[in-house]
Image (cartoon, rainbow, N blue to C red):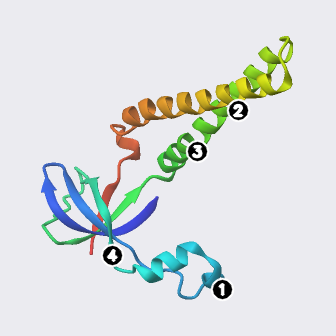
Amino acid sequence: MLTETARVVALEGDSVWVETLRQSSCGACAARSGCGHGMINSAKAGVSQGLIKALLPLDSGLTVSLHDTVEIAIPERGFLRAAWMLYAMPLLMTVLAAVVADQLFSSAALSQAAADLRVTLAAIAGLAGGLLILRAVSRRMSHDPDIQPRVTGVS
């Protein structure tokens, strides 16, 4: 489970809206001077990252009230699945469209520049298609309880 500390800003039935706080964890890292993540954390430590809806566990009897500091967790499997979809789907669709277009236009009586242009346009169309597929899948995945953030404890 990937965990984060957050502050409750609203209560909503079986879930809460939380505001995560960026915490600088790069203080002792040897690569902090050349790391973009470390520079962002040092510049904006304690700044809000946005609101997240987190589900409350139904069977734990956990009591949460407004402005409580809570621990939220996201299952690693769901996070990795979402990350794979986000990065791999558009890339795979782009490459697939370019390869198919290259196979189709390599035997045609076209100049090399015309064939390259068509392959480039096919790759752009593949990228757009991958982004559209990603949009549809992400809407479906947004209602999947296995990847929803959950409150795991109150600090």
**Compared with residue 131, is residue 77 higher up or lower down, i.e. above or below?**
below
Whichever of callouts 1 and 2 sits on the residue coming sooner in the sequence is 1
Where on the picture, by quarter, is residue 38? bottom right
Q: Earlier in the sequence, mark 3 or mark 2?
A: 3
Mark 1 and mark 2: Cα distance apart in space: 37 Å
What secondary structure is found at the residue carrying circle 4?
Answer: loop
Cα–Cα span, label 4 and label 1 = 24 Å
Q: How many residues crowd around disc 4 within 10 Å: few (fewer than 14), some, or many (20 or more)?
A: few
Q: Which mark is residue 87?
A: 3
- Tag 2 residue: 95
Q: Amino acid at mark 1?
A: Ala
Q: What type is the residue that disc 4 sits on?
A: Val
* Cα gap from disc 3 to disc 2, whole angstroms: 13 Å
Instruction: Report how far apart the C-alphas of labels 3 and 1 lie in the structure.
Output: 29 Å
Mark 2 vs mark 4: in front: 2
Q: Nearer the viewer, residue 118 or 37?
A: 118
Left or right of 118 in this view: 45: left
Label 2 and label 4: CA atoms lie apart by: 39 Å
Q: Quadrant of residue 29?
A: bottom right
Q: Secondary structure at mark 2?
A: helix
Residue receiving disc 1: 30
Q: Which mark is residue 47?
A: 4
In percent of width and height, residue 77 lies at 52, 47
Q: Amino acid at mark 2?
A: Val
Q: 17 or 56: nearer the eye? A: 17
